[in-house]
């Protein structure tokens, strides 16, 4: 799978499973949202710095995305770990970066049917926990 395939997957898939590593090295899957703007994918922690996956990323641990429907992780995180995955890197985006406004707009466009969840994902706390997904 190429990085372009990963970008297309993140764009087309409603819920993606981000795979990170706990401190003991064991993998864990978390269902999250992703948007793509001008060919660049972004993810954001709706729960700010308290989300486990966010803390794993900030600790410098490996990151990957399941390359099939990440909604599996909403129902069964262990099952999501058996899905094929592709390693990525994440670059932190400053909260005051203008791209955050476009990410907010993209979140509204993709997830308009879940307004309360979008509201949670566009708070200042969440905006401070935004990443650009890049090739490893």
Image (spheres, grey):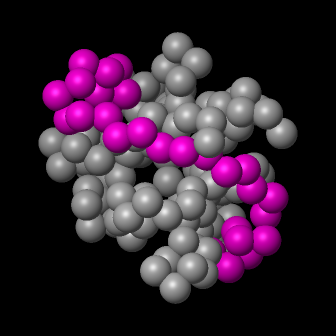
Residue 18: percent from the left, percent from the top? 57, 57
Residue 5: percent from the left, percent from the top? 76, 32
In this rendering, would 132 be left or right of 36?
Answer: left
Check if residue 31 falls in the magenta segment: no
**What residue appears at the point 22 percent right and 43 percent down from the top-left corner?**
128
**What residue appears at the point 54 percent right and 65 percent down from the top-left corner?**
20
**What residue appears at the point 49 percent right and 77 percent down from the top-left corner?**
22
Which portion, as a residue range, is magenta?
77-104
**What residue appears at the point 25 percent right and 19 percent down from the top-left corner?**
98
Q: Nearer the viewer, residue 131 or 111?
A: 131
Q: Nearer the viewer, residue 114 or 126?
A: 126
Q: Nearer the viewer, residue 33 or 60?
A: 60
Q: Nearer the viewer, residue 17 or 61?
A: 61
In this rendering, would 110 be left or right of 27?
Answer: left
Where, quadrant-wise, is the C terminus in this rendering?
top right
Classify 30 as above or below 41: below
Check if residue 101 falls in the magenta segment: yes
In this rendering, would 58 be left or right of 79?
Answer: left
Residue 45: percent from the left, percent from the top? 35, 52
Classify 108 as above or below 19: above
Query: Which residue, as the protein is rendered here, is positioned at the far top?
Result: 38
Query: Which residue, as the protein is rendered here, is positioned at the far bottom?
Result: 24
Classify 98 as above or below 85: above
Quadrant in the rendering for residue 4: top right
Camera sees residue 118: no
Camera sees residue 130: yes
In this rendering, would 67 be left or right of 117?
Answer: right
Where, quadrant-wise, is the N terminus in this rendering?
top right
């Amino acid at each position: 799978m190429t990085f372009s395939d990963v970008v297309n997957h993140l764009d087309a898939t409603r819920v993606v499973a981000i795979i990170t590593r706990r401190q003991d090295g064991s993998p864990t899957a978390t269902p999250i949202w992703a948007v793509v703007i001008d060919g660049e994918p972004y993810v954001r922690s709706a729960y700010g710095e308290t989300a486990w996956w966010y803390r794993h990323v900030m600790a410098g641990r490996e990151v990957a995305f399941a390359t099939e429907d990440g909604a599996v992780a909403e129902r069964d995180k262990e099952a999501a770990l058996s899905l094929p995955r592709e390693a990525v890197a994440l670059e932190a985006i400053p909260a005051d970066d203008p791209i955050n406004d476009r990410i907010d707009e993209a979140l509204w466009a993709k997830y308009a049917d879940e307004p309360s969840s979008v509201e949670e994902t566009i708070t200042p706390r969440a905006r401070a926990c935004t990443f650009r997904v890049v090739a490893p």
